Image: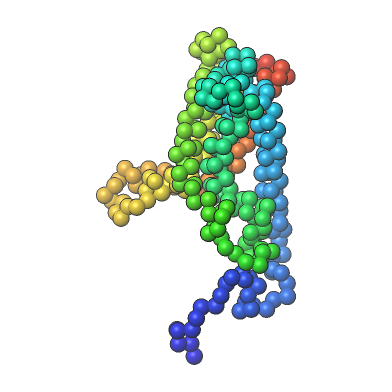
Amino acid sequence: MATGTEPRPSTTGGVREGNRAAIDAPHLRIDRWWLAPAATAAGLLAFIVYSTWRAFSNADYYAAPYVSPFYSPCLADNCRDMAGGPNWDLFGSWWGISPAIIVLIFPLSFRLTCYYYRKAYYRGFWASPPACAVAEPHKSYSGETRFPLILQNIHRYTFYVALLVAGVLTYDTVLSFRDEHHHWGHMGLGTIVFLVNIVLIWAYTFSCHSCRHIVGGRLRHFSKHPVRYRMWGWVGKLNARHMQLAWASLISVAVADFYVFLLASGAFSDPRLF
């Protein structure tokens, strides 16, 4: 008879501990459980390859009035070579490589530590675990308590960085309503691309779990904070679509960059709507 004082069994060996059920099969799932992590890995790998190419290309990232979201804000001195493209020049001429290397650090810090993206690349690339009810191949599990994964805890702070990034991209979207002569009233196909992208960027940012906690966390009584409760409800609805918004915004930012690349490389001219 159990007395309630027995020591808890060790779980350092994960599912391979001796106190686990003795089942010969590695798992009992009979569906195509591997499709989801394989598709996730393929999608993320495609974005990694594309963004790496564009980040190091250091060319074709400005076509008036559009600037690629991979290069905005352009912080390096060599941005002046891009046909009068925008330049904040916070870095001097000593910065000789692509200015996108500076820019992409900030949105990547937010996305790489995002709760959904952690699940996505943990499962897709590290098989940790590959799927529900499927044992991971690792013999032990330390979670996010050791370096480098302990750095995932900075996510709550990178949320504020993401707000700045979204603000800059919003500014770029507003400028997309100007023509190449800086006259307002322009609207091209690129303007639509930028509008869709910034809406998805903001929706993904606000759907973040950190945002939900900031809005409605650490409250004992929602009834005493009706405004924050209502905002918490709105963020909660977005949070329920966090996965879809994460993918949609990832695709939209790549599409916006590729559209600018096509214009800047002379593939075609931006169709003007009015």
Q: Work out which quarter of the rendered image holds the C terminus and state it.
A: top right
Q: Is residue 162 left or right of residue 219?
A: right
Question: Relative to residue 273, is residue 73 depicted above or below?
Answer: below
Can residue 248 be seen in the rendering of this structure? Answer: no
Name the residue at the front extreme. 94
Which x, y percent locates residue 72? 56, 27
In the image, 97 versus 250, the foreground residue is 97
- Residue drawn where x is 49% and y is 47% of the image: 155
Snapshot colouring: rainbow
Which x, y percent locates residue 174? 49, 21
Q: Is residue 53 left or right of residue 6?
A: right
Q: Is residue 135 left or right of residue 222?
A: right
In the image, 37 versus 18, the foreground residue is 18
- Residue drawn where x is 71% and y is 17% of the image: 266
In the image, 134 versus 59, the foreground residue is 59
Residue 52 figure quarter: top right
- Residue drawn where x is 57% and y is 40% of the image: 108
- Residue drawn where x is 56% and y is 23% of the image: 92
How many marks are shown on the rendered structure? 0
Which x, y percent locates residue 260? 64, 23
Can residue 171 be seen in the rendering of this structure? Answer: yes
Name the residue at the bottom extreme. 1
Question: Relative to residue 45, is residue 199 depicted above or below?
Answer: above
Question: Relative to residue 80, is residue 219 depicted above or below?
Answer: below
Residue 13 figure quarter: bottom right
Which x, y percent locates residue 210? 45, 47
